[in-house]
Amino acid sequence: MPLFALICFDKPNALDLRMATREAHLAYVRENLAMVKVAGPMLDAGDGMAGSLFVIEAETRDAVEAFNAADPYQQAGLFGQVEIRGFRATLGQL
């Protein structure tokens, strides 16, 4: 099954929104662990959370878009930019 990188950049100065929505986001990701292979926050220069990175296994890009659309972070308006790219794992294990 294809892999995709879902790269989400927080809007500036959105840490309070991220923290207020974090538990709902984590619960949503846990409910979708069959497709989420690796996930975690991206960090800024000061090690503060500033975005999210996922490696997702899905049949189509549309499925990744649907996953992102239902994420509480996305629904709360946390992300300023989202990129979805096909991904090919060459080294390491998922």
Image (cartoon, rainbow, N blue to C red):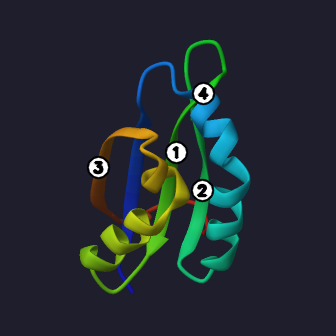
- Residue 17 on image: x %, y %: 58, 35
Between disc 3 and disc 4, the foreground one is 4
Task: Kindly identify which residue carries mark 2.
Answer: 39
**Marks 4 and 1: CB-CB under 8 Å?**
no
Is tag 3's residue or tag 4's residue first in the polypeptide sequence? 4
Q: Please name the amino acid that badge 3 sits on.
A: Glu
Q: Earlier in the sequence, mark 2 or mark 3?
A: 2
Residue type highlighted by circle 2: Ala
Residue bearing the label numbered 1: 52
Q: CA distance from mark 3 to mark 1?
A: 11 Å
Which numbered disc, 4 or 2, marks the residue that appears first in the sequence?
Answer: 4
Query: Label 4: which residue?
Result: 15
Residue bearing mark 3 = 83
Q: Amino acid at mark 1?
A: Ser
- Please say if the residues under marks 2 and 1 sit with CB atoms less than 8 Å apart: yes
Secondary element type, mark 1: strand
The N terminus is located in which quarter? bottom left
Question: For this view, does 80 lie left or right of residue 39?
Answer: left
Numbered-mark total: 4
The alpha-carbon separation of the residues under discs 2 and 3 comes to: 15 Å
Where residue 93 sits in the image (x, y, percent)? 61, 67
The kind of residue tagged 4 is Leu
Q: CA distance from mark 4 to mark 1?
A: 12 Å
Q: Which of the two discs, 4 and 2, sits closer to the camera? A: 4
The quadrant of the image that shows the C terminus is: bottom right
Q: Identify the residue at image location x=64%, y=47%.
A: 21
**How far is the residue under mark 4 from the one under mark 2?**
18 Å
Q: Nearer the viewer, residue 19 or 58?
A: 19
Q: Marks 2 and 1, how far apart in space? A: 7 Å
